[in-house]
Amino acid sequence: MTGQRLRTKRVYEPAGPDDGARVLVDRLWPRGVSREGARIALWLKDIAPSDALRKRFHGKPEDWSLFCDAYAEELAEPAVQSAIERVRTCLRDGPVTLLYAARDTERNNAVALKAWLERTFEDQA
């Protein structure tokens, strides 16, 4: 059920009627984007990969699985739990779209986060 209500979308794409709560999950604010124009409900920079992790894997698609594993370790840290709980609260109210700025639509932190959230939320259900 979470998979149908949790989506990812590039922040530069127009907001759609089915997006629900639009949550920016990047540590850096995307260039040229206004909060109002992008209809961003929340900016959860604490849920984004650390700068060190982001820099370590930037531009290395061959290391995707290593990135996902390292990111999962960061997501399990207590400091990130309040941001995760905010996503869970939004999901109780309806669909959630995780927004990202990366050009790669298949390998980015929002895709990795979505997969992790789906596994975690289903394990806790």
Image: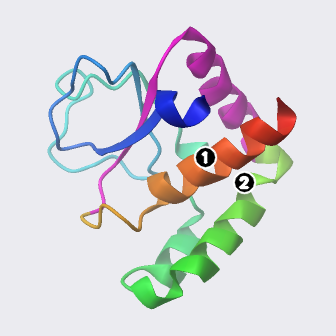
Give the residue type that dot 1 points to: Ile
Regarding residue 81, the answer to whether it shows in the image is: yes
Task: Name the quarter where the C terminus is drawn.
Answer: top right
In the rendered image, the vertical position of residue 36 relative to residue 31, given as above or below: above
Q: Nearer the viewer, residue 18 or 98?
A: 18
User: What residue did someone put label 2 on?
Assistant: 75
Image point (65%, 43%), residue name: 118
What is the magenta segment's predominant secondary structure?
helix
Image quadrant in which the N terminus is located: top right
> Is residue 91 rendered to the left or right of residue 23?
right
Q: Is residue 43 visible?
A: no
Dot 1 corresponds to which residue? 47
In space, the residues marked 1 and 2 are separated at their CA atoms by 7 Å
Secondary structure at badge 2 equals helix
**Residue at left 57%, top 61%?**
49
**Is 26 located above or below residue 34 in the figure?**
below
The picture quadrant where one finds residue 46 is top right
- Seen at 66% across and 52% down, the residue is 116
Q: Magenta region: which residues?
A: 80-102
Residue 17 placed where, x, y %? 24, 16
- On screen, residue 25 versus residue 70, left or right, reads left
| Residue 111 in picture, x, y percent from top left | 47, 55
Of residues 12 and 4, the one drawn nearer to the viewer in this rendering: 4
Residue 57 forms part of the magenta stretch: no
